[in-house]
Amino acid sequence: MLHALSVWFGSGYVPGGLAAAPAVSAPPAGALGIPGVLGQADTAGADGVIDPAGLGYRLAELFMFSPIINGIIAALSVLALGLFLWLLLTINARAVAPRDFIDEITRLVVRGDLEKAADLCRRARGVFIAPIVQRCVENAGQGHSVVLEMVGSEGRRAADVVWNRVSYLADISNVAPMLGLLGTVIGMITAFFGLERETGSINATVLSRGVGQAMTTTMFGLGVAIMALVMYSIIKSRATRTLAEAERAVNTIADHLQRNDE
């Protein structure tokens, strides 16, 4: 009896007259031709780990769909990174309102030695608050309200310079996706005009190249825009905090000048 059952099941016979469904073999890896399906055509090894070299080759291949526009976008990414690092080094407490400089100016103002304080500000050209404090010290005898007005005017002028530098990152985040959109339009035009010149059947090469140019420029443009926007948010927060500290330091020095006048 057991032998008969084994013969039935081994031959595909199922009691009740239903034959077993034949086993469906899976398609060979990479045969589907769909990006992201692991196999020989993709960038994953036998253990399922993405191959960095293959991924780099894919990015280079995508880049060459539209090398001119993608090259401009890549240059913008390098510019954004360099600007971000430069702003990190220049917008901080040491460059805007150094503690040693503030302590020395405060000490000279409390002693009433305003000439030395103004001279120290003239020599500290690399310090953000130096010209603001210099205007404050040189006009100490004109009344506290006048001094505060001068400090506010000079401070706004200096802050505008800082915000103008920071806005470059925002400009890059706006220009990069526009370049990507330009590449998209050019790619679609290339695809449509290429198909128009074809007679008979659709040329898959012309269509894939035009659509590939359209999609890759958009991808690179959005990637650079997102990166620049994140950098802009970081620098904007840093600049807001640093300029607030500088304003507080200048107001403290102006208060000491008022006490000396009284």
Image (tube, rainbow, N blue to C red):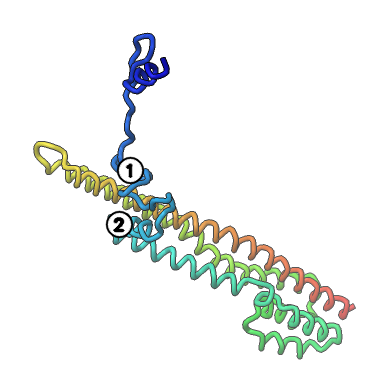
**Location of residue 119 in the rendering, given as x and y in whole percent from the top left corner:** 71, 89
Asked which quadrant contains residue 166, the reply is: bottom right
Q: Secondary structure at mark 1?
A: loop
Q: Is residue 38 left or right of residue 162?
A: left
- Height in image: 126 above or below 239? below
Q: Give the mark nearest the N terminus, 1 or 2.
A: 1
- Height in image: 61 above or below 90? above
Q: Is residue 59 left or right of residue 192?
A: right
Q: Is residue 168 left or right of residue 198?
A: right
> Can you tell which mark lies on residue 29?
1
**Location of residue 260 in the rendering, given as x and y in whole percent from the top left corner:** 87, 80
Asked which quadrant contains residue 196, the reply is: top left
**Location of residue 99 in the rendering, given as x and y in whole percent from the top left corner:** 75, 78
> Can you tell which mark lies on residue 61?
2
Rounded to the nearest angstrom, the CA distance separating label 1 from label 2 is 22 Å
Q: Residue at x 34, y 63 (%)?
A: 71
Which amino acid type corresponds to the residue marked 1 in the rendered image?
A: Ala
Residue 85 shows in this picture: yes
Query: Which label lies toward us, 1 or 2?
Result: 1
- Height in image: 261 above or below 220? below
Whether the residues at callouts 1 and 2 have beta carbons within 8 Å, the answer is no
In the image, 58 versus 198, the foreground residue is 58
In the image, 239 versus 120, the foreground residue is 239
Which quadrant, please, contains the C terminus?
bottom right
Q: Residue furthest right?
A: 262
Estimate how packed mark 2 is, as few (under 14), some (14 to 19) or many (20 or more) residues with alpha carbons within 10 Å: few
Residue 146 shows in this picture: no
Which amino acid type corresponds to the residue marked 2 in the rendered image?
A: Glu
Q: Residue at x 65, y 80 (%)?
A: 127
